[in-house]
Amino acid sequence: MLKLTIAGLAGLCLAACASQPIDRDAQHLHAERSCRVRAAVSPAYALDSTGIGLRNVAFGRCMREADSVRGR
């Protein structure tokens, strides 16, 4: 009985892995949402000539990383 249960669970796991991949648009929206949260939590500001940066660059950096990972 235990072997049958384990075989059934293994079959369900394999079936879940064989499902459709995430749509590219949905993947982009997910990465964008994640990057917005990251940018809000740990902001990184670009310094200008006055030494004070007002533009948050964490979102752009995160999106570039997400695009490079997705392109692999």
Image (tube, rainbow, N blue to C red):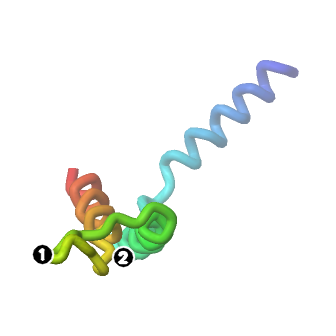
- Which of the two discs, 2 and 1, labels the residue nearer the N terminus? 2
- Report x, y in % for residue 4: 78, 25
Amino acid type, callout 1: Ser
Circles 2 and 1, Cβ within 8 Å, touching? The answer is no
User: Could you tell me which quadrant the N terminus lies in?
Assistant: top right
Query: Can residue 23 be seen here?
Result: no
Is residue 6 shown above or below 62?
Answer: above
Amino acid type, callout 2: Asp
Is residue 67 shown above or below 52?
Answer: above
Q: Residue at x 58, y 48 (%)?
A: 16
Which is nearer the eye, 56 or 33?
56
**Toward which corner of the image does residue 45 lie, by quadrant?**
bottom left
Which is nearer the eye, 21 or 49?
49
Q: Is residue 12 left or right of residue 69?
A: right
Q: Which marked residue is nearer to the observer: mark 2 or mark 1?
A: 1
Q: Residues within 10 Å of mark 1 (few under 14, many from 20)?
A: few
Q: Residue at x 42, y 68 (%)?
A: 39
Q: Residues within 10 Å of mark 2 (few under 14, many from 20)?
A: few
Q: Which residue is mark 2?
A: 25
Query: Can residue 10 be seen here?
Result: yes
Which is nearer the eye, 19 or 67?
67
Distance, label 2 to label 1, CA atoms, is 38 Å
Total count of labels: 2
- Callout 1 secondary element: loop
Q: Is residue 61 left or right of residue 13?
A: left
Q: Which mark is residue 49?
A: 1
Q: Which residue, as the protein is rendered here, is positioned at the far right? A: 1
Q: Residue at x 26, y 63 (%)?
A: 61
Q: Which residue, as the protein is rendered here, is positioned at the far left? A: 49
